[in-house]
Image (cartoon, rainbow, N blue to C red):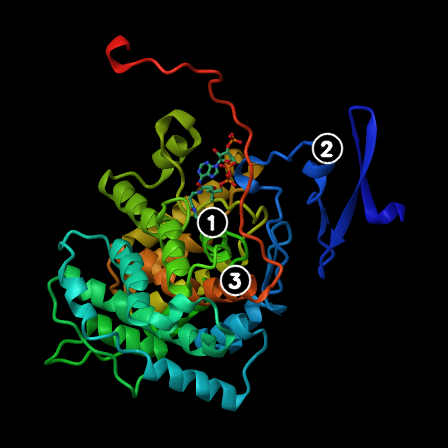
Amino acid sequence: MANNTAKLDLDGKIYELPLIVGSENEKAIDIASLRAQTNHITFDDGYGNTGSCKSEITFIDGDLGILRYRGYPIEELAEKSSFIEVSYLLIWGHLPNKAELTEFSNLLSQEQTIHANMKHHFEGFPSTAHPMAILSSMINAVSAYYPELLEGYNPAHFKLQAARLISQVRSIAAFSYRQSHGLPIIYPKKSLKYTPNFIHMMFSEPYDEFVIDPAVTKALDLIFLLHADHEQNCSTSTVRMVGSSRANLFASTAAGVCALWGPLHGGANQAVIEMLLEIHASGDDGRKFIEAAKDKNSGKKLMGFGHRVYKNYDPRAMIIKKACDDVLKALKINDPLLDIAKHLETAALSDPYFVERKLYPNVDFYSGIIMRAIGIPVEMFTVIFAIGRMPGWIANYKEVSDNQGTRIYRPRQIYTGPINQKYIPIDQR
Ligand code: ACO
């Protein structure tokens, strides 16, 4: 029994709290009864030590640099699988057989065209609108066209809704790019697979079909796959939180897009390129910037470095670094920003400031360079991340919704504001 509980000594009384052990031997103290028993809550600013749920989707060991989707190592999936197969795996928990994959692919093709009336919504955005603002609004707007969503989570319809969302997020993303650049909208083609279809919608013209380089398809599919899930990060926790209120799938994932937008989360890949451009424009080879990033008063950070969970290395960064070299070689691109990035990486990895704080390049350090090489504009980088993360958000939404025991997520707080204030009429203030 002693091994199954933790003992808390509080105000001279001993409380026993059950332990939970995950399938990878991760351990937690179950404090669900703590407040009822002791009138205390736990305090964990930023949730660094808080397990908010039990999940069967993704496992990360940040110290060992391990990432597995449904038990499969990310390295193996990156080498052998595709984004769509991995999407199926994340959402339904197993690798699809041929029939399942065909059914899923057919649903994706069937659902790829957004409702014709939605075109007017795109036209309502100013040309200066950030595509993430368009993306979150439009994903939410899709739910207005499918009233059955308002009935709440229904496992019978979920396969269709999930496919619709994965397929349409890609069309919305491409449309928002075309709209914000004053370009005519290019519709998806049934004959193309998921990733080349996105490239087609981004870069073809009505009079000139874009010739898709297989190296570009491979690199972009890999970027989607590597971003497909990452357990309880800021945006996924947001999706789960909104989903726990029984909000529909589209509303919940639109909230995820908003969370992802921030520069400390999905916005980091855009911030990496902006940082590299700034360094390049100033004539610095990266050295001055590194010094600034170490100075807390400078307001600078080495973007694309550091991670809340990975304190050894980001396994996705290892995979994508090689893909970055491959795609630049295939496209015969010589990018001075890549040279600066490599210089920054080497310098930071031997600098005690970064070494002591275990700050390593994360996936965003390289994904931005690949996307730039492909010709994707910087403001679309986070949108690409959102397309990739969609199956992870859907899988997490499904997990919350399938669990009959899910209560609405509602953390507590420690109030530190003023007390016993007396209202003063406005003319006396
Ligand atoms: N550059 C310089 N210093 C850094 C950096 C960085 N990129 N990241 C962390 N540090 C420093 C912090 O200032 C802090 O120093 P201190 O101990 O002297 O106070 C220490 O390293 C620990 O950092 P925290 O901020 O506590 O780390 P946290 O886990 O809260 O933040 C985060 C992680 C947000 C990713 C942070 O490292 C960061 O801002 N990195 C740059 C942005 C980025 O690349 N984000 C992408 C994340 S990956 C993703 O979303 C896919």
The single residue placed furthest to the top in the displayed view is 428
Marks 3 and 2: CB-CB under 8 Å?
no
Residue at the (29%, 86%) spot, across then down: 190
Residue named by callout 3: 396
The single residue placed furthest to the bottom in the displayed view is 99
Q: Position of residue 174 (x, y in %)?
A: 24, 68
Q: Position of residue 203 (x, y in %)?
A: 20, 72
Choose the circle earlier in sequence order: 3 or 1. 1
Looking at the rendered structure, the secondary structure element under dot 1 is helix
Q: Could you give the CA–CA distance between mark 3 and mark 1, rounded to whole angstroms? A: 13 Å
Residue at the (41%, 44%) spot, across then down: 264
What amino acid type should be assigned to the residue bearing mark 1? Cys
Task: Tell me: is circle 1 under 8 Å from ligand 1.
Answer: yes
Q: Which marked residue is nearer to the observer: mark 2 or mark 1?
A: 2
Choose the circle earlier in sequence order: 2 or 1. 2
Please name whichever residue, 240 or 333, is drawn nearer the observer in this view of the structure. Answer: 240
The single residue placed furthest to the right in the displayed view is 1
Q: Is residue 219 visible?
A: no
* Mark 2 burial class by Cα count in 10 Å: few <14, some 14-19, many 20+: few
Residue named by callout 2: 38
Residue at the (41%, 58%) spot, across then down: 252
Q: Position of residue 335 (x, y in %)?
A: 28, 57
